[in-house]
Amino acid sequence: MRILVLIALGLTAAAAHAQEAARIEVLNADVWKFEEEVAPGVQRLQGNVRFKHEDAIMHCDSAWLYQERTVKAYGHIRIVQGDTLTITGERLDYNGKERTATLDGDVVMVDPGTTLRTPALVYDLRNKSATYTGGGTIVSHAEGDTLTSRVGTYLSDARRFDFSRDVVLRHPERTITSDTLHYHTATGVAEFFGPTTITQKTSRIECVRGTYDTHTRVADFTQRARVITDGQELEGDTVHYDGEAGIGLAWGHVVATDTANGTTVNGDHGRYDQKSEHSYVTGHAELLMRSDSDTLFMHADSLFAAPDTAGGPRRITARRGVRFYKKDLQGVCDTLIYAETDSMIRMFHEPVLWSGKDQITGDHIRIALVDGHVHRLYADGNAFMTSLVDSVHFDQVVGTTMTGYFVNNELDHLRTEGNARTGYYAQETEDSVE
């Protein structure tokens, strides 16, 4: 029993000490008087007023101090907490029990390297967090960032801002707009939780969820995102982009688009190097190449694109299990190369080509395009063509090389050279002599 009494007395003494520590201490006032007619125990303070509560000191021109440990203060409000944080404003409602300060009138909060301006602010001195709901502007002096939003919370110990609604982060090298953004002032890392656009000098990123390091310019996005650079677009379910190196990586439902040349590549994984202009897509890769009135569809395991010369025409290479289709032409091979320089498609390793009822094979097949349409066809080495006559009969032509001439997107005639041989299926007509 004695031990329990001692414990109870100890708890009572601790509670009394805590209550004593929670009192608001008046450090200075030029005029200090009680105003009992206003409310029991209320005190009126005027001129160079200073309060202290816990680890915070508050300055103002005048104030009302109430028994329930609340303060209403006016004129040149200044709250100093610790050695680093200062808040100024024109009016203050302070709740000593909850340790919350509500300020309005051109509120400015200054933390090391950061300044926040807002019409009104609620500051929780216990948790060291500040919240505004009427719009605010934050300037990071070390990073050169200016951030605005309609709603925001600053967590002083974590050095983190949480913003929502019309968020805009501006920097000489970038502009970020977002629905919801968390910004770590110590690391310069921004986290996104809603539709976001990052605009830089040579690129634009559209995303929904992810992070962006403003120091290293490295971005990682875990929901659908798109990187747009100099006529190239890379999109995927997951995207990594290194702005300094100019390299973008994408995984899952990848779409790589060359807007300058009207080509789109789909696949499982993609990579684009902005500096070298090299790119590739692997895994169920599909190319769509648009011309005036037709589209070439190509499937392969991997598709690669690179300029023949820096900034010059591009070369597209398809490898393994290549299949392509357009209205007037279809083909398969193991490796295919398309060069914008001469608008030539080159097929390697057991190429097979179909045009209407004709099938053409050779060691190597070349297809010359003009304005996106087939103009010439070249089969080099063991050239062979077979043409369907009916369900069981075929005409055949064989030679060393073969050149096909197209008119109105159809094979019009063929020239065969080098040990040329033909085999045609003879057909009777009504005028045949019996």
Image: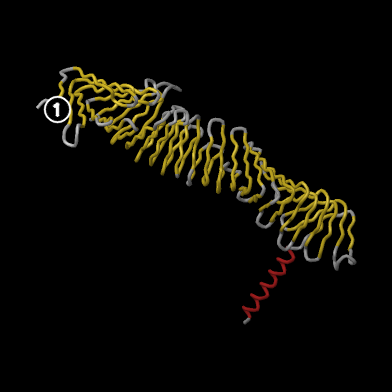
Looking at the image, residue 224 lies above or below residue 402: below
User: Could you say where residue 41 lies in the image, as x and y percent from the top left?
Assistant: 85, 67
Task: State the colouring used for the structure image.
Answer: secondary structure
Mark 1 belongs to which amino acid? Answer: Ala
Nearest the viewer among 300 and 77 is 300
Residue sitting at x 17%, y 27%: 396
Looking at the image, residue 254 lies above or below residue 75: above
For this view, does 343 lie left or right of residue 46? Answer: left
Furthest residue toward bottom? 1
Residue sitting at x 20%, y 26%: 384
For this view, does 46 lie left or right of residue 78? Answer: right
Find disc 1 in the rendering and name its residue. 426
Which of the image's four quarters has the C terminus?
top left
Nearest the viewer among 28 and 183 is 183
For this view, does 137 lie left or right of residue 32? Answer: left
Furthest residue toward top? 418
User: Could you say where residue 180 lies in the image, as x and y percent from the top left?
Assistant: 59, 48
Looking at the image, residue 92 lies above or below residue 187: below
Furthest residue toward left? 434
Residue sitting at x 69%, y 51%: 133
Instruction: Count the numbered circles shown.
Output: 1
Q: Residues within 10 Å of mark 1 (few under 14, many from 20)?
A: few
Residue sitting at x 73%, y 66%: 19
User: Could you say where residue 131 lies in the image, as x and y percent from the top left?
Assistant: 68, 52
Looking at the image, residue 353 lies above or below residue 415: below
User: Could you say where residue 110 lies in the image, as x and y percent from the top left?
Assistant: 71, 45
Which of the image's four quarters has the N terminus?
bottom right
Q: Secondary structure at mark 1?
A: loop
Nearest the viewer among 224 and 88 is 224
